[in-house]
Image (cartoon, grey):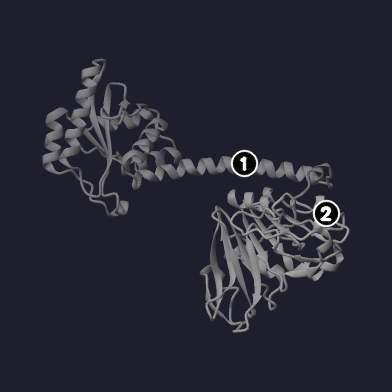
Amino acid sequence: MKRILSKGSDLPFVHESVGWNESANFKDYDIVFVNLRTLEENSEDYDHPYNKSEDSPCIFDSSDVATFLNEFGYMVVYLPDEPIVNMGNTTDTSPTTLHQIPETGVAEGREGEINQPQESPSDLSDEYDLMDWLPCSTTLKTDEEGESVGVVNGDWEWYFGNTFKWDKIIQLEVGKRYYSESIAENSYGKKIAGKVSNNGYIALIPPHYGRSYSQFVKSTLEQVFDIESGVKGRSPPSWLSEFTLPEEESIEESIDSKKAEIEDLEEELDALTDYKGLLYETSTRLEEITRKVLRELGFTVEDEELGKRDGVLHTEETKYVLEITGTTGGVKLSKGRQLDEWVENVVAESIEKEISGLLIVNLEMDMAPEERDIRIEPNVESYMKRRGDYKVLTTLDLYKLVKRDLEVGVEKEDIEKIFDQDETLLSLPEDLQD
């Protein structure tokens, strides 16, 4: 589950919301929404960030943002209308609280940026760039050519509709670590929304004055990140477990009991559903179900030995070497020959009992059971009689046996009598039919 943080707006459907006067370890989250509009609108309530006083806003550090992106984090920044705001007074700011100025007089900037000389503390005004914390150079400029939208990335078409208007463009300068993409452009091909990407990305989205910020975040979660915005408030704090209401514990115990009962019923249902595989499965899955059903009917059945046999069914008198298969048609001669090879393998290993072969086959498995033509071609039957009086049992009859056993019970001895039939293709006696 993706964890979501809102910075600058209190939203009831995210995991945590923090204001501009609160800090948060946003690296604990997968998606972070940042509302710079609220900081723009209330900028005069704060001291300048460079002062780092208790009245300064808690703004992200660009190096932390870079780490967040590198670790596949996603950030959506709701841009201000005017990025440069007045905020507090910097005239008393100590040089130690500002970015350090190297001896060359050039400030150390972000990777890929051209570093500019930094003003001395006495020259600083109370202006602050709200996008200064981004790990790239970001500039908003008014575009006098127009404010209508032209090209839009498919994920964001819902936002930049006919009613969207904005008279600014975004200029992005990124270093080698990042690359920039356009999310939306105006009708003159200039970028009005963009994305700065590494492993994760920052989406820079202009404000939409016909849509509330809450609607914007909800729609972004659903349309861009494919996340239902159904988070019920903030994540409960750890101390909340100390508070209980009447009947709360008994209800929880009842729920746990019912969950266990449901799990047991689901296991029973899965087991019953497995039996239906006798009617349509083939290959390994059919082999597994067949051995399981024979065991539940009371027989000892050895597991498959790859390249030697699909299993061995033990009756009182005979060991039946198994070849288990599914086919869209009838029984092919190749399956009889395969069974004969399996029998020879077992004969070479053991002389304890009489050994024969049993071909268990899901005939015409693509057809409904009542439409299947259950028969064996004469050449196949002749081969199987000649090689060892091998038998054929359909998985349809095996399904009928297990169904009968579940309904009224079937004795293992009655099933064994089926193998004594003279015919190659075995059939169920009337008393074991549905």
Task: Residue type at mark 2: give it.
Answer: Lys
Judged from this view, the residue extending furthest toward the front is 104
Give residue 12's position: percent from left, percent from top.
75, 61
Query: What residue do we see at 68% from left, 54% from top?
Result: 62
Q: Nearer the viewer, residue 388 or 350?
A: 350
What's the mark number on residue 207? none
Q: Residues within 10 Å of mark 1 (few under 14, many from 20)?
A: few
Residue 432 in sight here: no
Query: What residue do we see at 36% from left, 40% from top?
Result: 285
Compared with 10, 251 (above or below) is: above
232 sits left or right of 149 in the view = right
- Quarter in which the C terminus is drawn: top left
Q: Nearer the viewer, residue 224 or 351?
A: 224
Judged from this view, the residue extending furthest toward the bottom is 145
348 sits left or right of 287 in the view = left
Which comes sooner in the sequence, label 2 or label 1? 2
Task: Residue type at mark 1: give it.
Answer: Glu
Judged from this view, the residue extending furthest toward the top is 352
Give residue 3's position: percent from left, percent from top.
66, 52
Q: Nearer the viewer, residue 428 or 342?
A: 342
Given this view, does label 2 or label 1 mark the residue nearer the observer? 2
Whole-number angstrom distance, CA of label 2 to CA of label 1: 58 Å
The quadrant where residue 167 appears:
bottom right
Residue position marked by numbered label 2 in the rendering: 52
186 sits left or right of 347 in the view = right
Give residue 7's position: percent from left, percent from top.
74, 59
| Label 1 residue SS | helix
| Label 2 residue SS | loop
Residue position marked by numbered label 1 in the rendering: 261
Compared with 130, 112 (above or below) is: above
Q: Residues within 10 Å of mark 2 (few under 14, many from 20)?
A: some
The quadrant where residue 397 appears:
top left
